[in-house]
Amino acid sequence: MIQRYRIESESSGDNMRSTPLTMLLVLLILQPLALPVAAASWEEDGWLETIGAEERLLAGDEFACHGIPGLSWQADPGAVASECREYITDRIAASSWGEQPLSARTPSGLTYLDHALVDDLGFPVHGDLTGLADTAWHSQDDEPEQPEDWYNLGRRGGSLEKAMNTVSGVESEASKGGLLNFYWIGKVGDNTIRHDSEIEGWLLESDAWFTTWGVAWSTWIIQRCHQFEHDTLSTDADGKWLFEVSRPTACQSLEGRAWDVPVTWRINASQSSVSSVVYSETGESLEQLEVTENQLKSGWRMDGGHLLLTVAVGKEVEISFENADVDVDILDEKWFNGRSFAVTIASHSTEDLFTWSKRFDASSDLRFTWLLTPRDARTSSPWLPIVGVVVVLSSMLAFSLIIRKDRRFIGPIEEE
């Protein structure tokens, strides 16, 4: 005997009773979207807006871009660069030499068009080891010749991590000159990384100029594109000579992509020593630098028969020689104050500036390029998977209740 059954909807009263269950189901489904933690993919590093970060800034460090959680350099480099730029500028200046950030850590695998887009968004310095054919400072002879070379900054010098490098290796590389770019990361997971104090000590005693990615780039740009303003290449009858570095019209396209940092020029004045250097407009004296000075600033010092003069673009100075009618010759000088090589330290994936920087006192001569990234909010919310399980189980229970309320069997309608 076969029984047939007829399925019938509940009455309107029963439908009204099922409405709260339906609403409960909708709320459970929408609950993850309403959670505050899930509304944003990252959390900011609050220490960027403290006096500790300001001390780093005033000391000469640079704040640059590493990335943004939830955004991919490969998928949309423009979005990463734009949001990372906003993340920095909303919280702190990029450098004491300029408000806008210039440097970004871009991964390997991007095309030249991708790098050009990031450059157009204000980041001309890309590092390091990006895999491009054009390179800068991958060896002592790999001097940049065009702006695109800075899309692939090298990693000469190696790591500052303990047991990852040797003093002899660093010393050998430094003796070749050029720019050494060290790698540093302050924490992996819950483990704080120890730095190599022996390498730190050797660097502090060396003939290095300690600088950052953005300052090194800006120095190179000014050296590459400038003009000198002076009447003659000799002093007047009183032994005075006016000197100024200016930016020609052809360089205006670089505005906003380089800071107006002071740059060192070597002036051959072997016929006479210099007695003073003052700003023409104010008469204020430039600082007379020590031979050991390794922090960028305006000033001057004698190096044998040569004057090492460090001045910013657009600042005219009056140089007083001890003798009159002295012939002068302006020469390029690669690094600040006649130092024999330059050192940058890139702190990668800096999501916690306090932890990353606390091993290095701000008063130290070492300068850091802090490659910033916000904290990934998902990694800081271990209870979210539990919420997900609860939502799924609650949804299944709600579906079961609704089906049992909305559908019911009403006896057999016929027999065969």
Image (cartoon, helix red, strand yellow):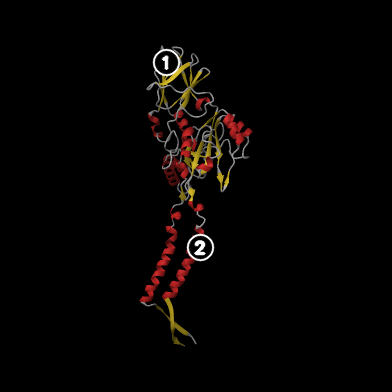
| Label 1 Cα crowd, 10 Å radius (few <14 / some 14-19 / many 20+) | many
Q: Nearer the viewer, residue 304 or 115?
A: 304
Point 43% across, 61% down: residue:
31
Distance, label 2 to label 1, CA atoms, is: 81 Å
Res 330 visible: yes
Pinpoint residue 291: horizontal percent, then vertical percent.
Answer: 53, 23
**Contact check, label 2 and label 1, Cβ < 8 Å:** no
Query: Identity of the amino acid at label 2?
Result: Val
Q: Position of residue 113 (x, y in %)?
A: 45, 42
The label shown at residue 240 is 1
Q: Is residue 383 left or right of residue 410?
A: right
Q: Is residue 24 above or below residue 112?
A: below
The residue under the point 62% across, 37% down is 165
Q: Give the label, 2 or 1, closer to the camera.
A: 2
Residue 131 in view (yes/no): no
Closer to us: 181 or 206: 206
Q: Position of residue 409 (x, y in %)?
A: 44, 80
**Foreground: 193 or 80?**
193
Q: Looking at the image, how many numbered discs can be counted on the residues?
A: 2
* Residue on which disc 2 sits: 389
